[in-house]
Amino acid sequence: MTAEPSPSAGRMRASDADREAVVELLREAAADGRLDLDELDTRLGQALVAKTRGELVPLTDDLGPVAFEPGEPLTLQGGIHGAERTGVWKVPPRIVAFGGLGGVRLDFTRAECRLREVEVDVDAQMAGVRIVVPVGWKAETDALDLGFGGLKDKTEGDRLPGTPVIRLTGTCGAGGVVIRNPNLRERRRQRKEQAG
């Protein structure tokens, strides 16, 4: 199940982080040749003075997904001891996660993701799959078979403009799938790393 933004989501005040995310996406689009310099200047000006999230959305809607190089999906197999992808890493368009007995943990909080959409195909098996996403990212879970373990979507707030959608497919198995934002300890550690 995916939480749809409330009708008033477009009237929500835009934060500096919201504006910066859109500015970065616009710069990437210009670097890729999807915007010319005049369009970039116009949209950057609009992004920097935007008061609401609704004013930011049209600035990136027509840009489409960022081009990616096709390749093999990232495959994580939990096996007996578990598997994880954390820290700084480049997100591919497709990830396959087998929970096994040890589980799989995917942490996107410091990942480099230039895609609008990432497909995560899960087979949670016995231990499950845990996914951590930054605040503002959302998961599309309609194609996920809940199995015995079920799904817990603990993400907060609405999707921010320019952030990826994680499309979950596959089965929750007995271990289940949890998708959440960073907890307090993880946020503190991240702030400490950024400061020092």
Image (cartoon, helix red, strand yellow):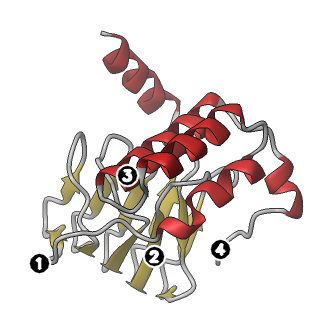
The answer to whether residue 160 of the structure is visible from this angle is yes
Q: Is residue 125 left or right of residue 61?
A: left
Of the image marks 4 and 2, the number of the one nearer the N terminus: 4
Label of residue 72 in the image? 1
Reading the image, the residue beneath label 3 is 30
Quick one: label 1, few (<14), some, or many (20+) residues within 10 Å? few
- Disc 4 is placed on an element classified as loop
Q: Amino acid at mark 2?
A: Arg
Q: How far apart, in angstroms, are the residues tagged by discs 4 and 3?
A: 31 Å
Label of residue 167 in the image? 2
Q: How far apart, in angstroms, are the residues tagged by discs 2 and 3?
A: 26 Å
Q: Residue at x 61, y 51 (%)?
A: 160
Of the image marks 3 and 1, the number of the one nearer the N terminus: 3
Q: Is residue 114 left or right of residue 139?
A: left
* Whole-percent x, y for residue 127 in the image: 32, 69
Circles 2 and 1 in contact, beta carbons < 8 Å: no
Q: Amino acid at mark 3?
A: Ala
Q: How far apart, in angstroms, are the residues tagged by discs 4 and 1?
A: 28 Å
Q: Amino acid at mark 1?
A: Glu
Q: Amino acid at mark 4?
A: Thr
Of the image marks 4 and 1, the number of the one nearer the N terminus: 4
The answer to whether residue 123 of the structure is visible from this angle is no
Above or below, 59 relative to 189: below
